[in-house]
Image (cartoon, grey):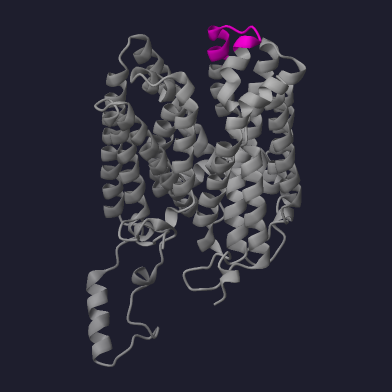
Amino acid sequence: MGRGRSRTPRTPGGAPPSPRARRIIRLNNGFQLLFNLLWWMPVFYAYQRQAGLTDGQIFGIQSIYYIAFCLFEIPTGLVADRIGARNCLRAGALVMTAANLAPVLTPNYSGFLVHFLLIAAGRSLTSGAASAYLYDGLRAEGAPEHYLKAEGQARALGLAAKVLCWPLVGPLMALAHSAPYVLSAASAGGSLVCAVLLPRQLTPGGRDAGRRTAPRAHGGSFRHEAAAALRSVRATPWLALVMVQGVALFTLSRICQVNLFQPVLLDHGIAEDSHGAVLAAMTVAEAVASARPHWLTARLSPVAWVSLLSLAMAAALAGSTLGGPWTVVGLLCLFAAVTGFAYPLQRKLVNDAIPAGAPRATLLSVESIIDRAVCALAAVAAGGYLAAGRLDALLWHSALATVALLAVLHLLLRRHRRSPAAPRPDRKALGIAAILELCGLRRPGGTARTPSARRTPARPTASTWERSPTTR
């Protein structure tokens, strides 16, 4: 094999993805990188303060943003399943471009409020649709085993772009004060170009998936999609349990990287001018791990891996209360690396658990709603702890809450494994059939098994999912 082919990812069986699958992966990488490249992220607090907003107004807008995101997730997931994931990605990129221009046109409270409301709408339009498009697109091309690596690679590239671009924000602001928002709008415009170039999605049989929604133009189709999503969750306990497992992962990562990052560093005497370097180091660690979830061995099931990684994140946060500044920086980088490993694995786990024919984008939006609702409650609790000066207690209680949640979850998983997915076969009939087979006799139907023994479960059981390795 020549070295020139080493850049082409290969399946465990050795077959490379088709040209169409490679195009899907490349354009998805470009979309995820540009859509999530928010140049203003490191300076938005100071930028709003300079625009005359008070702390109450700034954090009030953040609260409204979380609430709006949860509210937008429901209709946008339904829209994605109705008009197609590709069209939903285009709409989200267009909304995000407009969102980043709002503070430039109106740099006041109203402008920033509109800015974050549009961001909530744009991100909710793409949160489930992007993953659904990539998963279904690779499956239609006969390359579903590439999904995990493609999801992690896209996340890694996006994080690497932030490491390269965020240090430039300060000098660029010195040249043009609104540069971070203008560049963010330009990046969102680039993601729109990638979404336009995405190929039309095909079904596994080769049919055009973009036309499947035409018969649903009648009234009530949104209600039909919502009811189908709820039926899928109710009929698939494994899917609900997997979604709940992701709550600990998302909440810990979000609370640490957004709400507790600076308080933890300041509490250990790390000056503000060093926070950017620490954030860059954390981002590098997360980017490297996100691109390599396949490093995780198949000796443990994906569910066990996600649980262990979530516990490691909680332990890193709790351990940061015991060491000095360098220990804290090391633990935060470890926290980021574990997050990078866990996110693609959890995303694939949820996608694999969604039954065939179910509204995938809607169900992924349901998962996002659950995650952000819990995160909003955790943010309120974190604010109360910080106001009381109990940062160490907050970190330890977060770790204990994670352990308790995962313990209850695994008890439910064990109970789910023990519950049969199909009616138990008649052991007496099976024994008679086995004797007949040994004697060379056959039943009139030509089979030695009862119908109940031949019945195939309508969905995979927990043990089936756990035995299916998602990493190589």
Q: Residue at x 45, y 54 (%)?
A: 292
Q: Position of residue 172 (x, y in %)?
A: 68, 26
User: Is residue 54 located in the magenta-colored stretch of the structure?
Assistant: yes
User: Is residue 425 located in the magenta-colored stretch of the structure?
Assistant: no
The number of numbered discs placed on residues in the rendered structure image is: 0
Q: Nearer the viewer, residue 417 or 294?
A: 294
Q: Nearer the viewer, residue 424 or 142?
A: 142
Q: Position of residue 71 (x, y in %)?
A: 58, 27
Q: Is any atom of residue 106 visible in this view? A: yes
- Start and end of the magenta stretch? 49-61
The reply, left or right, for residue 418 in relation to residue 182 is left
Q: Position of residue 434 (x, y in %)?
A: 25, 82
The reply, left or right, for residue 413 in relation to residue 293 is left
The reply, left or right, for residue 436 in relation to residue 32 is left
Q: Residue at x 60, y 20 (%)?
A: 44
Q: Position of residue 96 (x, y in %)?
A: 69, 32
Above or below, 187 against 215 in this view is above
Q: Residue at x 24, y 92 (%)?
A: 439
Q: Is any atom of residue 223 visible in this view? A: no
Quarter of the image with the C terminus in it: bottom left
Quarter of the image with the N terminus in it: bottom right
Q: Nearer the viewer, residue 180 or 458?
A: 180
Above or below, 441 against 256 in this view is below
User: Which of the 4 image quarters holds residue 269?
Assistant: top left
Instruction: Tell me the chief SS of the magenta region.
Output: helix
Above or below, 177 against 250 in this view is above
User: Which of the 4 image quarters holds residue 396?
Assistant: top left
Q: Nearer the viewer, residue 326 or 213?
A: 326
Q: Residue at x 39, y 68 (%)?
A: 455
